[in-house]
Image (cartoon, helix red, strand yellow):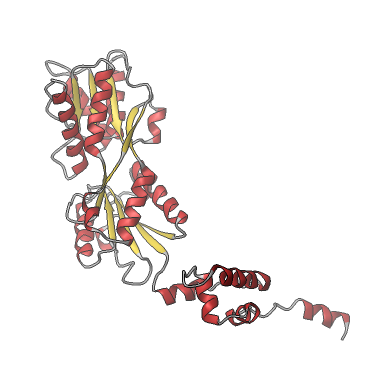
Amino acid sequence: MSDETQATSQRKTPLRVRSYDVAELAGVSQSTVSRALAGSAAITEATRTRVVEAARKLGYQVDDRAARLRSGRTETIAVVVIGQAGAPPSSVNPFNFALLGSVCAEAADRGLHSLVSFQSEEERFFSQFVERGQADAVIVIGTTTNQPAWDYFRAANDGQPHMAFWGSPFDDHAAIRSDNMAGGRLAVDVLLGAGYRRIAFIGDTTSTQRQFAERYDGYCAALRENGLEPLAAAAGSGETRQDQGRAAIANLLDGGDPPDAVFAACDAMAFGAVAELRARGVALPQDFGIIGFDGLGGGALCEPPLTTIEPDFGAAAKLLIDAGLDPQEDALSARVPVRLIERASVR
């Protein structure tokens, strides 16, 4: 054989190692190899060790696709992010991006893949990821302002139980939410502890945004427990949450008996309220305190930095994935714990 022929021969790709080869080296059957590498409890630890060592020596690669076909699972979750109709994905609420990241990270920790879909236009709604063998569960998160989207996914959930929702305006399916009542109580307790006494709430409690009403209920309960009468929720008009927050605080300040503190239904509204307060020369936090809800990172860049109530994103991701993969009745009322992020908007 010439040197050139010998070199060409050496460059040839080696034959693919098969499970049969591993079984022969380990002295077991092919089915034992499959079960050992899949983590089956029926295989003794000594046998599993022998199979794993044989696979390592031979460079055997498990055929994930074949394994998934045999098990009937895709090891993938689909995550649908609902946006506003006519708006690009970049306009999605930063909270939903943070939740999306947490869900994908939790999926990766479980050895699952994530299939992400941004949906906003009615003619392009799609939910059949499980039926088409693309995913084992579907998680839907996003704005409640896109009613056609929620109507579509609610109907889809009737025939497909492996779905879980965050931000849904409905209560008859696995709708995971923050512990909004606890968050409202916590916000009021912090403001009272800082010496504020006339505390208002801004946010539309009559909208499909159910969490706003729950946060207001917590606000009311905490004030009454401290012998104080809650104020009616103040809502402001505007295209964005920031605009609504700015309008709501303006209405309160222009009223006959303005508050000295505000619990905003969401951080975006709080940002607008802070902008209006600063424009009017109100000293924060000395003369006026404000707390938001959502734990948005942008709150640290606010002036002053915004104190906020933050849901446990990691816990939210776990609950969503659990509810999607293994639908249970108690998922209908699952609530995510919250915590205080102290910054400088409260004295």
Q: In the picture shown, does residue 75 fall above or below 193?
A: below
User: Residue drawn at (39%, 70%), measured in percent from left and top?
Assistant: 73
Could you tell me residue 72's position as x and y percent?
39, 74
Q: Quadrant of residue 190?
A: top left
Q: Where's the C terminus, which quadrant?
A: top left
State the residue in front, 180 or 37.
37
Q: Where's the N terminus, which quadrant?
A: bottom right
In the picture as drawn, the residue positioned furthest to the bottom comes out as 1
Q: Quadrant of residue 59?
A: bottom right
User: Residue drawn at (18%, 24%), measured in percent from left and top?
Assistant: 200
Query: Left or right: where does residue 30 sit relative to residue 298?
Result: right
Q: In the picture shown, does residue 185 fall above or below 161?
A: above
Residue 293 in view, yes or no:
yes
Query: Left or right: where does residue 223 sit relative to residue 111?
Result: left
Q: In the picture shown, does residue 306 fall above or below 195?
A: below
User: Residue drawn at (39%, 51%), measured in percent from left and top?
Assistant: 103
Query: Left or right: where does residue 207 sit relative to residue 194?
Result: left
* Numbered circles on residues, count: 0
In the picture as drawn, the residue positioned furthest to the right comes out as 2
Could you tell me residue 304's position as x and y percent?
37, 22
Query: Left or right: where does residue 93 sit relative to residue 206?
Result: right
Could you tell me residue 96's position as x and y percent?
34, 46
State the residue in front, 120 or 56.
56
State the residue in front, 262 or 278.
262
Residue 237 in view, yes or no:
no
Q: In the picture shown, does residue 242 fall above or below 66?
A: above
